[in-house]
Image: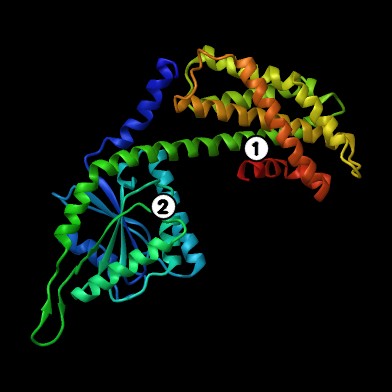
């Protein structure tokens, strides 16, 4: 566990963003599915712009009404054009990250209403792909599939059967937390001179959403913490990348890399910066972690073995300065990755900073990671020019994390 100060800071970091009486419902769907019409009917007034099937919502917008226990977030209508899908996905991701960074409760996502045109008669697998990609940043978020324009009983039955048939065959259906499907008519429709279909299903949609609120808040809290950690990791990765570039410059100097004292100030600044990003306030324990990483990184046998490994690649003739630069950058990258790993575990409560043999633990991490990175670099140097590998060192090493 963290020290008391660290534990308090992490709780405080999450407190404001989670303390809000209202939850937020993200309303998604294909352009023309009736998202904005549904929003206006739930609100009881015309707030969201509507159209005749074309995309009319230019960007994400938040709507709320007195007495309604949730906000509604309208999104740009989904299209089957791949570039438009990427744009929408990126917009939702940016929206979500901004809400965590700025502790903006109006941008949290708790529940999704996924609108499907009840007159369409088809649900495509790529529609579910879109729903999955757009929602996965909010892990396990509850989803209500809303069949808009559900004018007849036969259509309702056909649509529900169609949807569950497609969902059951969807290869990633376990990643979609679909809680129910609901047919609705959002506004009255004149069938002929004598017959009119009146709105229906709206109260049931509100009640189903209200019933999901307690569970949605719990899942949302976990999702916020996950997003927050991802944001911290992205910031920490930026520091590591900058430090690796500096280390390769230092490494090109003809000195013995694993013992180079020139790397220590650079690596020290990187590690303290990462600790600050993760909000580690237990100064004595943090100092021990950082000093141990620096000590092991400068003296570990794995670091010296890395240089030897790179020099002995069959059929490869690489200048000593390039080898030293790659080794210096790799050791710095490894030190950064180890600190990120440790501080993430501290924030999650998986490591007690005051009760661990840091020298043994960090030496093990260095040996394991440098052995893996060495193999990755060997493969890269056999396939690419050594100078190109050096220029893209962070990318080459990061590939190992993604495989």
Q: Secondary structure at mark 1?
A: helix
At x 87%, y 40%, the residue is: 313
Residue farthest toward the bottom in the current orientation of the protein: 193
Q: Quadrant of residue 259?
A: top right
Instruction: Report the disc number at residue 336.
Output: none
Could you tell me which quadrant the C terminus lies in?
top right
Q: Is residue 274 left or right of residue 181?
A: right
Picture coordinates of residue 360, whole percent (x, y): 64, 16
295 or 98, which lies in front?
Answer: 295
At x 17%, y 61%, the residue is: 202
Picture coordinates of residue 157, whole percent (x, y): 24, 71
Question: What is the crowding at mark 1: few (fewer than 14 residues within 10 Å), some, or many (at least 20)?
Answer: some
Q: Quadrant of residue 291?
A: top right
Compared with 293, 19 (above or below) is below
Q: Secondary structure at mark 2?
A: helix
Residue 149 in view in this figure: no
* Residue occupied by mark 1: 241
Q: Tell me if label 1 and label 2 are in contact, CB under 8 Å.
A: no
Q: CA distance from mark 1 to mark 2?
A: 35 Å
Picture coordinates of residue 383, whole percent (x, y): 81, 50
* Residue occupied by mark 2: 174
């Amino acid at each position: 566990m963290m020290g008391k100060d660290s534990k308090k800071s992490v709780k405080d970091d999450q407190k404001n963003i989670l303390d809000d009486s209202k939850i937020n419902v993200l309303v998604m769907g294909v352009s023309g599915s009736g998202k904005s019409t549904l929003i206006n009917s739930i609100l009881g007034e015309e707030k969201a712009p509507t159209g005749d099937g074309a995309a009319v919502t230019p960007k994400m917008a938040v709507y709320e009404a007195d007495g309604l226990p949730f906000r509604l977030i309208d999104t740009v209508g989904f299209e089957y054009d791949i570039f438009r899908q990427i744009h929408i996905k990126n917009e939702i991701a940016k929206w979500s990250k901004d809400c965590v960074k700025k502790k903006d409760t109006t941008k949290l996502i708790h529940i999704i209403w996924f609108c499907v045109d009840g007159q369409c008669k088809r649900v495509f697998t790529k529609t579910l792909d879109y729903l999955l990609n757009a929602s996965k940043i909010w892990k396990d978020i509850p989803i209500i599939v809303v069949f808009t324009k559900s004018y007849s009983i036969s259509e309702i039955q056909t649509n529900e059967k169609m949807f569950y048939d497609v969902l059951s065959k969807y290869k990633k259906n376990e990643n979609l937390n679909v809680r129910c499907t609901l047919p609705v008519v959002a506004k009255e429709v004149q069938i002929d001179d004598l017959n009119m279909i009146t709105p229906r299903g709206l109260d049931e949609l509100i009640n189903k959403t209200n019933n999901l609120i307690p569970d949605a808040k719990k899942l949302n809290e976990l999702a916020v913490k996950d997003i927050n950690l991802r944001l911290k990791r992205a910031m920490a990765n930026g520091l590591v990348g900058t430090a690796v570039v500096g280390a390769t410059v230092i490494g090109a100097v003809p000195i013995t890399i694993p013992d180079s004292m020139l790397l220590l100030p650079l690596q020290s600044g990187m590690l303290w910066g990462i600790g600050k990003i993760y909000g580690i306030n237990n100064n004595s324990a943090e100092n021990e972690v950082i000093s141990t990483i620096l000590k092991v990184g400068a003296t570990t046998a794995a670091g010296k073995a890395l240089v030897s490994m790179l020099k002995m690649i069959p059929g490869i003739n690489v200048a000593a300065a390039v080898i030293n630069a790659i080794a210096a950058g790799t050791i710095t990258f490894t030190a950064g990755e180890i600190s990120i790993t440790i501080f993430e575990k501290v924030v999650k409560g998986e490591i007690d900073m005051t009760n661990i043999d840091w020298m043994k633990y960090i030496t093990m991490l260095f040996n394991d990671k440098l052995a893996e990175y060495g193999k990755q670099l060997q493969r890269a140097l056999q396939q690419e020019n050594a100078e190109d590998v050096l220029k893209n060192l962070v990318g080459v090493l990061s590939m190992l994390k993604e495989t």
